Amino acid sequence: MKPIKTWGTDDRPREKLRMKGASQLTDAEILAIIIQNGTKEKTALDLGIELMQRCHNKLADLARFSIKELMKTKGIGMAKAIAIQSALELGRRRQASDHLISEVVSNSASIAKYLQARLMDLPHEVFAVVFLNRANRIKHFEIISVGGMTGTVADPRIILKKALEEDAVSLILCHNHPSGNLRPSRADEEITTKIKNAARYFDINILDHIIVSTDGYYSFADEGGL
């Protein structure tokens, strides 16, 4: 195995990026730059190629790897796994910000793509809330609770306490379905009603409850569930 520094200039991922631009690199080459250093047996590019093979050359699948899952590749330690996860999270946030063209939320479509980009790759369920002011402008976004593969618990007291702290007038509830199924469960319907009823006592409006997955989104408001 020859170290990357002994390769031709056009073959080194960093030099290739500098000379030709990031768009000319393969996914494995970009991973090699993030990984930085290989091992005695493998170059950083070898590790990048192996990671892409493990996720069937699909970045969407790589984005769902936990730190422990990344570290199953020999040569990927804690620091490298954290660097890879950080890069993937930065990509998610960029994608999310691209979808949120305006800070004013006028309908489900204007916020759903943002929420989908933020939450769709998570391997476990989370419950999040978007807090809005009187003009329906976003004041704050926060993941309220984290659950397992099949569910999470949303405490109305925590949500409303946070809403009062943020001086929010309206809320959009959101959670993800890692399974890909977008249909709401009975528990989803019950927690929506529970939070909506509790919010009335504080003159806080629940505008929507949106379920997201890799396949799209489901809006309670659009489907008459609010």
Image: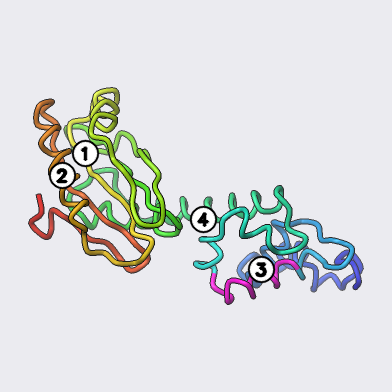
Q: Position of residue 90 (x, y in %)?
A: 53, 51
Quarter residue 184 falls in: bottom left
Q: Residue sitting at 35 percent across and 57 percent down?
A: 150
Report the amino acid beneath label 3: Leu
Q: Residue sitting at 31 percent across and 51 percent down?
A: 175
Q: Which residue is mark 1?
A: 171
Q: Which residue is mark 3?
A: 51
Mark earlier in primary sequence (3, 1): 3
Report the amino acid beneath label 2: Leu
Mark earlier in primary sequence (2, 1): 1
Q: Is residue 189 magenta?
A: no
Q: Is residue 1 left or right of residue 214?
A: right
Label 3 environment density (alpha carbons within 10 Å; few <14, some 14–19, many ≥20): many
| Mark seen at residue 91 | 4
Report the amino acid beneath label 1: Leu
Disc 3 and disc 1: Cα gap in Å?
Answer: 40 Å
Quarter residue 193 falls in: top left
Q: Which residues are magenta?
A: 47-58
Q: Which residue is mark 2?
A: 207
Mark earlier in primary sequence (3, 4): 3
Q: Is residue 66 left or right of residue 209?
A: right
Q: Is residue 17 above or below residue 36?
A: below
Mark earlier in primary sequence (2, 3): 3
Report the amino acid beneath label 4: Gly
Instruction: Mark 2 and mark 3 in contact? Answer it, CB < 8 Å.
Output: no
Q: Which of pointers 3 and 1 indicates the residue nearer the eye?
A: 3
Label 2 environment density (alpha carbons within 10 Å; few <14, some 14–19, many ≥20): some
